[in-house]
């Protein structure tokens, strides 16, 4: 469960996003609510997102051009990115989940949310989120390389190498994410401290006895 501080921080993000527009604000509110926005009013973001992910995986939604992503989803995504940059991981998670609940075709929000999950040590969740982004666009090299890095962090080097090979074959322009993945694979997974269960027991020392 999230601590009180996390709830307070994430609440600040939601309050800022839910604020009614004042004179001069550019936020459009005349558009009627979609069923997803209605769902968000009564359902925590994480539960609403779970329903959205099921829809994306089962129906097979396609990626929209950035210009066609719901503006409110983009605003939530920007709020999530700002919260992440400020170190507010709980707030970033809430905002990015809200972005995806508003528009599940917002591929960049999946990638950002996966990055937050990695920062939280949730590599398995990150891999699944990258997969959702790749369902929308299988040629997304950034999402593919990020998924490979999460696999390295999880210790799945063989799978990460397969992802690297695919990313290298797809990369045509900006190959920086691919180079970063290659470097991560070469470095290997982070060292994990042995637990008491994994530690190898040592033989007890014998105390020499004196001879008479």
Image: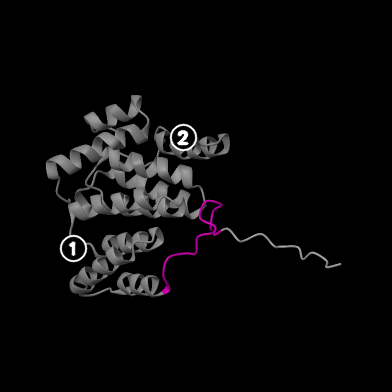
Relative to residue 11, is residue 63 drawn left or right?
A: left
Relative to residue 204, is residue 39 drawn left or right?
A: left
Give the foreground label among 2 and 1: 1
Image point (22%, 72%), residue name:
171
Q: Position of residue 210 (x, y in %)?
A: 83, 66
Main SS of the magenta part reads loop
Relative to residue 197, is residue 159 drawn left or right?
A: left
When the figure is inspected, residue 177 is found, relative to residue 151, above or below; the finding is below
Q: Which residues are magenta?
A: 187-200
Disc 2 packing (10 Å; few <14; some 14–19; many ≥20): few
Colouring scheme applied when the structure was drawn:
one colour
Q: Which residue is mark 1?
A: 139
- Residue 188 lies in the magenta stretch: yes
Picture quarter containing residue 101?
A: top left
Classify mark 2: helix, strand or loop. Answer: helix
Q: Which residue is mark 2?
A: 15
Front-most of 36 and 162?
A: 162
Q: Give the position of the C terminus as an image quadrant.
A: bottom right
Q: Position of residue 20 (x, y in %)?
A: 40, 32
Image point (41%, 54%), residue name:
118
């Amino acid at each position: 469960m999230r601590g009180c501080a996390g709830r307070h921080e994430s609440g600040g993000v939601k309050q800022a996003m839910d604020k009614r527009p004042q004179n001069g604000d550019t936020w459009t509110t005349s558009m009627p609510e979609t069923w997803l926005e209605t769902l968000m009013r009564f359902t925590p973001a994480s539960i609403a997102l779970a329903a959205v992910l099921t829809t994306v995986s089962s129906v097979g939604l396609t990626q929209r051009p950035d210009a066609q992503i719901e503006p409110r989803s983009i605003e939530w995504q920007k709020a999530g990115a700002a919260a992440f940059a400020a170190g507010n991981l709980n707030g970033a998670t809430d905002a990015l989940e809200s972005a995806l609940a508003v528009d599940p075709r917002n591929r960049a929000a999946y990638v950002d949310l996966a990055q937050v999950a990695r920062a939280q040590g949730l590599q398995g969740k990150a891999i699944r989120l990258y997969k959702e982004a790749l369902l929308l666009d299988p040629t997304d090299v950034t999402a593919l390389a990020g998924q490979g890095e999460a696999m390295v962090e999880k210790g799945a080097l063989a799978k990460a190498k397969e992802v690297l090979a695919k990313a290298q074959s797809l990369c045509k322009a900006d190959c920086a994410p691919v180079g970063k993945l290659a470097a991560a694979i070469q470095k290997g997974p982070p060292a994990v401290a042995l637990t008491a269960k994994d530690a190898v027991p040592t033989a007890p020392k014998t105390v020499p006895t004196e001879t008479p």
